Structure formats: C-alpha cells, structure tokens
Amino acid sequence: MHIVEAQELVDQWIRTIGRRYYNELTNTAILMEEVGEVARLMARMYGEQSFKHTEDAAKAPADLADEMADVLFVLICLANQTGVNLTEALLQNIEKKTNRDALRHQQNEKLQS
C-alpha cells in the first residue's frame, strides 16, 4: 500500500465507521498515548524493564505491531485533518536529512562498525 492509499483508507474508515474525526488536539493526545504504549513494550522487549506478571511476554511481538499500527493510524488522522500529504512530507524530509546528515553520519566514529 502506498502512503496516499493509507491516507485515503483511514479517511474512508473515519467517515463511515468512526463517523467523524476527533479534533486535532484530542488526536494529538491520543497519538502521545499510543507512542507511550510502543515505548512501554520496547522497554520490556529490548530494554532492561521486565514484563509484569499480568502481561503475556509471548504476545509482545504481535502487541508491538498492533501498537505501532495505532501510532500510524492516529498520525494519518492528524495528517488528513491538517492537510498534510505524507508522501510529499516524507520525501522532503528524506531530502532534508540527506543534505544535512550525509557527511555527518559517514564521519561519525560511533557508526563505523
């Protein structure tokens, strides 16, 4: 799926099943909540934090994928609401990073392994 198709699919879902978009501030708060859920799983799966006895560690990879999809969904909602074409924005962002960081990363001794 292309990003533009994802934006269209989310918009269609919101307008039919979701009925309408939450306002931008509410969606920003929801985005932060979803990012926190990704961070919680990352800390348990890859960091030093352990799973609680009530959490199923075996489900963590599927849970992580689902939480990342939640982040993407809400980010797409915000892009749709604010008129951001994520394809164009991503391409411009990659160009910015390429121009700004190409030599920086090549010359970074920490990345030379």
Image (cartoon, rainbow, N blue to C red):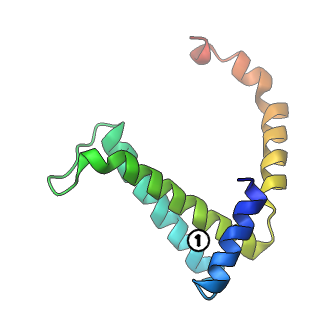
Determine whether, in the image, residue 25 is placed left or right of residue 8.
Answer: left
Kindly identify the residue that appears in the image at 46 percent across and 66 percent down.
33
Kindly identify the residue that appears in the image at 23 percent across and 43 percent down.
50
Determine whether, in the image, residue 34 is placed left or right of residue 95.
Answer: left
Q: Position of residue 108 (x, y in %)?
A: 66, 18
Residue 53 drawn above or below residue 96: below
Residue 111 drawn above or below residue 66: above
Determine whether, in the image, residue 77 is placed left or right of residue 43.
Answer: right
Q: Specify the amino acid type for callout 1.
A: Thr
**Within-10-Å neighbours for mark 1: few <14, some 14–19, many 20+:** some
Q: Position of residue 5 (x, y in %)?
A: 75, 61
Kindly identify the residue that appears in the image at 54 percent across and 66 percent down.
31
Q: Quadrant of residue 8?
A: bottom right
Q: Position of residue 109 (x, y in %)?
A: 62, 13
Q: Position of residue 4 (x, y in %)?
A: 78, 60
Q: How many marks?
A: 1
Q: Which residue is mark 1?
A: 28
Can residue 53 be seen from the camera position used here?
yes
Residue 37 drawn above or below residue 60: below
Can residue 23 be seen from the camera position used here?
no
Q: Residue furthest left?
A: 53
Q: Quadrant of residue 49?
A: top left
Residue 2 drawn above or below residue 12: above
16 or 90: nearer the viewer: 16
Kindly identify the residue that appears in the image at 82 percent across and 46 percent down.
91
SS label for mark 1: helix
Q: Residue furthest top?
A: 113
Determine whether, in the image, residue 62 is placed left or right of residue 101.
Answer: left
Q: Quadrant of residue 27?
A: bottom right
